[in-house]
Image (spheres, helix red, strand yellow):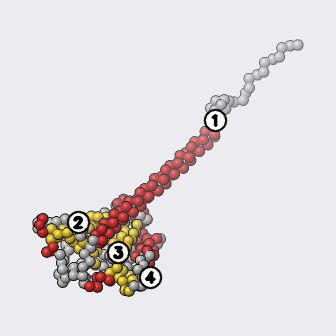
Amino acid sequence: MPPALPRPPSRRRPRRGGRDGFTLVEMLAAMAVFVLLALMTAQLLRTAALTTANSTKHLNADGQARLVFDRMQMDLGRMLKRSDVHFEFDKAAGNDRFYFYSEAPGFFGAGVASPQQSDVSLIGYQVASHQLQRLGKGLAWSQVAFLPSTFTIAPGDADFHVLGAAVFRMEIAFLVRQDDTSLLLTDTPPAPGPAFQNLWAIVVAIAILDPDSQKIVSGYDGLVSALPDFTGSRTLSLAAAASPGAAAVNPLMDAWRTAVNDPAFARTAQIPAQAAAQVRTYQRVFSLK
């Protein structure tokens, strides 16, 4: 039997990229999947970074509001509640302000020698240059304005110090006891004198915009006016010796939250939508009893 002839070599072309390699189509598909995964990862990281940044801004705003309200609580808790001592609560279009005497620390000027320094300071709160400022002026007893005397506050007084750098808005209202079963929530400031004894509490609302968002805001007039003033009055019923719940004294916050949640808020406030989304509002009721 004749020997078998050798088989001719195969004419099949090898796969591109070698015997165990990828075809061009497979390589392109792998690259496309890799690019897609990279884009998805980058988007997830960007979303996580934005979420973390917004959470940090909100936590910082919460911390600043707590600092402001705690300082107010200490000052108002030591307020001179005498019927013969002057004070001022000024309601205005936009930001309100108030000044009173308190047994709180203050800065004594050069004109008040150590033997004359009293335990009383002139305390004040106002918003100037889009920042909440606190006045703490140490006084001699002879400088306390007993009625009918008044005091004059210079806007640029050197004893004003920034308390809330991100607080651009402050609004106040008053809770006045009418009888044992009702309070009057009103925008009418109390007058110094015997009627002051009926003032049950002061309601203070503030609005905060973080420093990064402030950088893209060119003006605050529209933003301040977009958070409406509290006007008018309403009677709050309560049981004898009971305190009104937070929901009963929320007209300030309710109006502000409605404004902030309005889709047209950024346009009304005349600020970028990115900044409008970062406006935070807070309220606290300070009892004077």
Q: Which mark is residue 239?
A: 4
Observer-nearest of 251 and 6: 251
- Look at label 2 and name its amino acid: Pro
Within 10 angstroms of label 2, few (less than 14), some, or many (20 or more) residues? Answer: some
Q: Position of residue 264 (x, y in %)?
A: 45, 72
Mark 4 residue element: loop
For residue 284, say whether it is visible.
Answer: yes
Residue at 14% x, 66% y is 109
- Say what secondary structure mark 2 lies in: loop
Say whether residue 23 is left or right of residue 243: right
- State the residue in front, 67 or 229: 67
Q: What's the residue at 74%, 26% (across, down)?
A: 10
Question: In whole angstroms, how far apart are the C-alphas of marks 2 and 4?
Answer: 37 Å
Q: The N terminus lies in which quarter of the figure?
A: top right
Q: CA distance from mark 1 to mark 2?
A: 79 Å
Report, in whole angstroms, how far the alpha carbon at label 3 lies from the one at label 1: 77 Å
- Dot in front, 1 or 2: 2
Task: Find disc 2 in the rendering and name its residue.
Answer: 105
- Labels 2, 4: front one: 4
Q: Are marks 1 and 2 in contact (CB under 8 Å)?
A: no
Q: Which comes sooner in the sequence, label 3 or label 1? A: 1
Amino acid type, callout 3: Ser
Ranked by sequence position, the earlier of labels 4 and 3 is 4
Rendered image: mark on residue 22: 1
Q: Regarding mark 1 in the picture, which secondary structure is present there?
A: loop
Q: Nearer the viewer, mark 4 or mark 3?
A: 4
For marks 3 and 2 on the same chain, the one whose residue lies earlier in the sequence: 2
Residue 148, picture quadrant: bottom left
The residue carrying mark 3 is: 287
What x and y, as percent, mark residue 103?
Answer: 24, 70
